[in-house]
C-alpha cells in the first residue's frame, strides 16, 4: 500500500491545487549543467530556497552519499537535472558511462527521495527514449513500441528506467514523481567540445572558427536528419510549469513542435555567425535517428507555450559563446 497519498489531479493530469513554490526548499541536482543552471535561474524568480551540492561533495552514483545528503538537506521538491550526457559520438563512444551513470543517478535519487520524505520529485529525460522509427510527431504513448536508435540506446534505456521507476514508486509508495521528456536542447552553458557536444554548439563553434580562420565547415552525416531544438530557458520554464501544475503518471513531452534538417540548422547558424563560406558533409559520421519531433499536445493543453524562436535562441547562444568560450 502507498505510504503517502498523491495530490489529486484531473483526467488531463492537471493538479487540482497547484504546487506552491515560494519559500520551498528546492534541490536542483545537476546545477552546474546547462539544464540545471537554467532551472536555478528560473526557480530563483519563484522565490524558492535553492539547494545545490557540488559533485566533489556528493557523487550521485553513490547511494550512501545521496541518502546522507538528502537526509541532511531535507528538500521539499527535487528536480533531477543531473546526467551523463553528450552528442551522438559521445553516446556511441562511452556506452558504459551513459548507461551505468544514468541508471545509478536515477535509482539513487528516487529511492533517497522516498526515504527522506520529499514532497515532489521531477525527473528529466530525453526524446531519444522513443523508438528510432516511431510515427512523427511522437506522442507519449510511443514509448516501448519498437527498437531504439543504436547510437543512443544506452542513454535511452537509463532514461526509460527512470520513467518506469518513478511510476513504480508512485504506485507502490505513493511518491509524487512526475517526468518531463525534453527534445534536443541548446543554449548558454552548453558543452562546446567538438567530440562531446551536441550539434548546435558544435556547429556554432565550427562556423565561428571557419569565419575567422577559413572554411569549409564539416557537417557530420548527410545533413538530412530532422531535429527539434528547444532553448534551455524555455525548457526550464516548462519544467517549472509542470512542477507547479502537473500530477499525472505519464511522462510529458517538452518541445516546440517544429523541426528542421541539420542542413537548415547549419544555414541558420551561418546567418547568425555571419559566415558565407562552404559546408561539406562527412558521410563517415553517423546520422542517428532520421527524425525526432515530439507531439507536445499534452503540454500545450495544460497551458504552456515556448517563447524563444530558434534563430533568436541561436543568437543568444552565440553571444554567450563569444563572451565565455571563443578563443
Ligand atoms: O545533436 P546530436 O549529437 O544528437 O546530433 P542526436 C544531431 C545530428 O546532427 C546528427 C548531426 O545527425 C549528427 O550527425 N551533426 C552534424 C552533428 N554535424 C555535427 C557535429 O559537428 N556534432 C554533432 N554532435 N552532431 C542525441 C543523443 O542524439 O540527442 C543523446 O545522442 C540525447 O542521447 C540528445 O538524446 C538529445 O539528436 O542524434
Image (cartoon, rainbow, N blue to C red):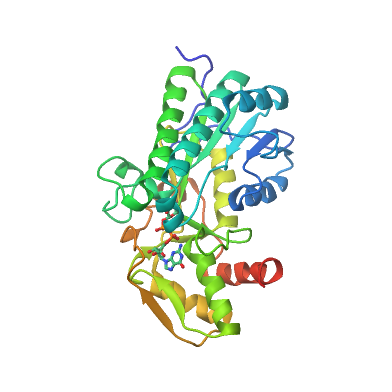
In the picture, measured across the screen, residue 73 lies left or right of residue 108, that is right
Residue drawn at point x = 43 percent, y = 28 percent? 165
Of residues 11 and 293, the one drawn nearer to the viewer in this rendering:
293
Res. 220 in view = yes
Of residues 300 and 225, the one drawn nearer to the viewer in this rendering:
225
Image quadrant of ligand 1 equals bottom left
Q: Is residue 277 above or below residue 148?
A: below
Q: Is residue 145 above or below residue 71?
A: below
Res. 309 in view = no
Labels in figure, total = 0
Q: Is residue 14 above or below residue 118?
A: below
Which percent across, then down, holds residue 276?
Answer: 50, 88
In the picture, measured across the screen, residue 284 lies left or right of residue 254, that is left
Q: Is residue 137 above or below residue 7?
A: below
Which percent across, then down, holds residue 46?
Answer: 70, 44
Residue drawn at point x = 62 percent, y = 28 percent? 66
Residue drawn at point x = 46 percent, y = 59 percent? 256
- The outermost residue toward the bottom is 276
Residue drawn at point x = 42 percent, y = 73 percent? 219
Q: Quadrant of the C terminus?
A: bottom right
Of residues 170 and 132, the one drawn nearer to the viewer in this rendering:
132
- The outermost residue toward the top is 1
Which percent across, then down, holds residue 320?
Answer: 66, 67
Which percent across, then down, holds residue 237?
Answer: 59, 51
Q: Quadrant of the N terminus?
A: top left
Amino acid at each position: 500500500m502507498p505510504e503517502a497519498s498523491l495530490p489529486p489531479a484531473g483526467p488531463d493530469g492537471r493538479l487540482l491545487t497547484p504546487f506552491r513554490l515560494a519559500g520551498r526548499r528546492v534541490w536542483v541536482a545537476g546545477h552546474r549543467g546547462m539544464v540545471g543552471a537554467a532551472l536555478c535561474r528560473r526557480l530563483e524568480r519563484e522565490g524558492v530556497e535553492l539547494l545545490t551540492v557540488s559533485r566533489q561533495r556528493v557523487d550521485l552514483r553513490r547511494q550512501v552519499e545521496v541518502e546522507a545528503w538528502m537526509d541532511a538537506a531535507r528538500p521539499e521538491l527535487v528536480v533531477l537535472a543531473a546526467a551523463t550526457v553528450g552528442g551522438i559520438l559521445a553516446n556511441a563512444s562511452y556506452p558504459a558511462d551513459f548507461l551505468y551513470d544514468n541508471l545509478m543517478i536515477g535509482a539513487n535519487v528516487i529511492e533517497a527521495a522516498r526515504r527522506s520524505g520529499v514532497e515532489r520529485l521531477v525527473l528529466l529525460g530525453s526524446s531519444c527514449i522513443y523508438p528510432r522509427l516511431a510515427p512523427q510527431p511522437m506522442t507519449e504513448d510511443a514509448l516501448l513500441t519498437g527498437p531504439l536508435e543504436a547510437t543512443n540506446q544506452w542513454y535511452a534505456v537509463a532514461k526509460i528506467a527512470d520513467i518506469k521507476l518513478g511510476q513504480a514508486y508512485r504506485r507502490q509508495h505513493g511518491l509524487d514523481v512526475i517526468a518531463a521528456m525534453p527534445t534536443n536542447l541548446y543554449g548558454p552553458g552548453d558543452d562546446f567540445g567538438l567530440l562531446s557536444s551536441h550539434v548546435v554548439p558544435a556547429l556554432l563553434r565550427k562556423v565561428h572558427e571557419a569565419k575567422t580562420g577559413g572554411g569549409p565547415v564539416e557537417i557530420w552525416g548527410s545533413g538530412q536528419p530532422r531535429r527539434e531544438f528547444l532553448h534551455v530557458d524555455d525548457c526550464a520554464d516548462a519544467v517549472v510549469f509542470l512542477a507547479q501544475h502537473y500530477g499525472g503518471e505519464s511522462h510529458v513531452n517538452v518541445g516546440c513542435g517544429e523541426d528542421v534538417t541539420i542542413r537548415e540548422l547549419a544555414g541558420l547558424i551561418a546567418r547568425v555567425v555571419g559566415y558565407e563560406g562552404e559546408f561539406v558533409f562527412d558521410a563517415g559520421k553517423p546520422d542517428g535517428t532520421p527524425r525526432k519531433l515530439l507531439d507536445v499536445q499534452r503540454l500545450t493543453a495544460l497551458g504552456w507555450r515556448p517563447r524563444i524562436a530558434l534563430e533568436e535562441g541561436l543568437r543568444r547562444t552565440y553571444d554567450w559563446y563569444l563572451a565565455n568560450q571563443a578563443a
